[in-house]
Image (cartoon, rainbow, N blue to C red):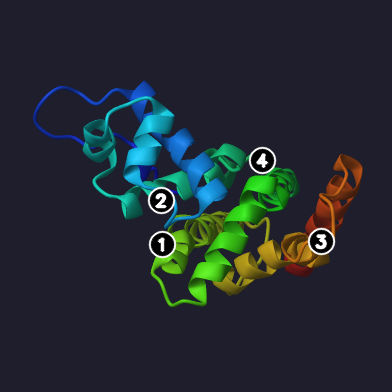
């Protein structure tokens, strides 16, 4: 996954302060989830971050960019880009377990469930928020998974003719029924043991299906 959205933009003037950028991102994540996209103004985010509104705009240009960066940042907390790089001496099973555990923890977290509910409610109104969310989070993660599966195929650890479909299969299996129940509010987060058993079962099934 590219991290260009998370890097300070270059330009004239003084260098951007990484600490302020991080504070703005954290404030944005909190407010977007608490108040929704429309209910979170740049004024409120700057006040929450303890910086000026001008500082927020100097780092993120506009609210849409800030929202996309907040989504990307949340994803990379659980699934750093290095998770999707397969070394020649690394077992694909181990790599998939790390990705599966990170993804499962991400999608079942209170923050992610709240964000998904927000995006789904906004999507019914035909706003651009759903597309921004998809491009910054799920789409980037899917592209990274496709890249990993292509590596596994080249190294002979898996035989994947259609990596896009295989990547979607993997993430859908990890979501399972638990994530749907979480979204509609009729289930608590799975215990650590239950979540790990689920991820291990999915990885075993996936590798069995795509093993050469």
Say which residue appears at 78% left-offset and 69% top-offset: 209
The residue carrying mark 1 is 132
Say which residue appears at 70% left-offset and 43% top-offset: 98
Q: Nearer the viewer, residue 89 or 193?
A: 193
Q: Position of residue 53 (x, y in %)?
A: 26, 35
Q: Position of residue 207 (x, y in %)?
A: 77, 60
The residue carrying mark 4 is 90
User: Do residues under tags 3 and 1 come within 8 Å of each other at their CB atoms?
Assistant: no
Along the polypeptide, which appears first: circle 4 or circle 1?
4
> Callout 4: 10 Å neighbours few (<14), some, many (20+)?
few
The residue carrying mark 2 is 67
The span from disc 2 to disc 4 (Cα, nearest Å) is: 35 Å
User: Do residues under tags 2 and 1 come within 8 Å of each other at their CB atoms?
Assistant: yes
33 shown above or below 134: above
Q: Position of residue 142 (x, y in %)?
A: 54, 61
Q: Nearer the viewer, residue 25 or 195?
A: 25
Residue 169 left/right relative to 120: right
Say which residue appears at 29% left-offset and 22% top-offset: 17
User: Do residues under tags 4 and 1 come within 8 Å of each other at their CB atoms?
Assistant: no
The span from disc 3 to disc 1 (Cα, nearest Å) is: 25 Å
Label 4 or label 3, whichever lies nearer to me, is 3
Q: Nearer the viewer, residue 86 or 164?
A: 164
Quadrant housing residue 159: bottom right
Quadrant housing residue 179: bottom right
The span from disc 2 to disc 1 (Cα, nearest Å) is: 8 Å
Quadrant housing residue 77: top right
Q: Is residue 81 visible?
A: no
The residue carrying mark 3 is 178
């Amino acid at each position: 996954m590219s991290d260009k959205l998370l890097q300070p933009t270059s330009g004239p003037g003084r260098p951007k302060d990484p600490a302020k950028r991080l504070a703005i991102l954290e404030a944005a994540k909190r407010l977007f989830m608490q108040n929704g996209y429309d209910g979170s103004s740049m004024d409120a985010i700057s006040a929450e971050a303890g910086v000026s509104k001008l500082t927020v705009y100097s780092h993120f240009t506009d609210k849409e960019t800030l929202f996309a960066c907040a989504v990307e940042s949340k994803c990379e907390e659980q699934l750093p880009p290095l998770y999707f790089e397969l070394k020649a001496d690394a077992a694909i099973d181990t790599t998939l377990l790390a990705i599966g555990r990170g993804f499962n923890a991400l999608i079942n977290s209170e923050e992610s469930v709240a964000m998904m509910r927000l995006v789904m409610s906004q999507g019914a109104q035909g706003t651009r928020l759903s597309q921004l969310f998809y491009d910054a989070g799920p789409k980037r993660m899917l592209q990274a998974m496709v890249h990993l599966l292509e590596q596994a195929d080249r190294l002979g650890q898996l035989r994947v003719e259609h990596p896009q479909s295989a990547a979607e299969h993997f993430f859908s299996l990890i979501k399972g029924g638990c994530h749907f129940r979480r979204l509609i509010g009729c289930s608590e987060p799975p215990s650590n043991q239950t979540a790990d058993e689920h991820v291990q079962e999915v990885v075993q099934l996936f590798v069995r299906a795509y093993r050469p």
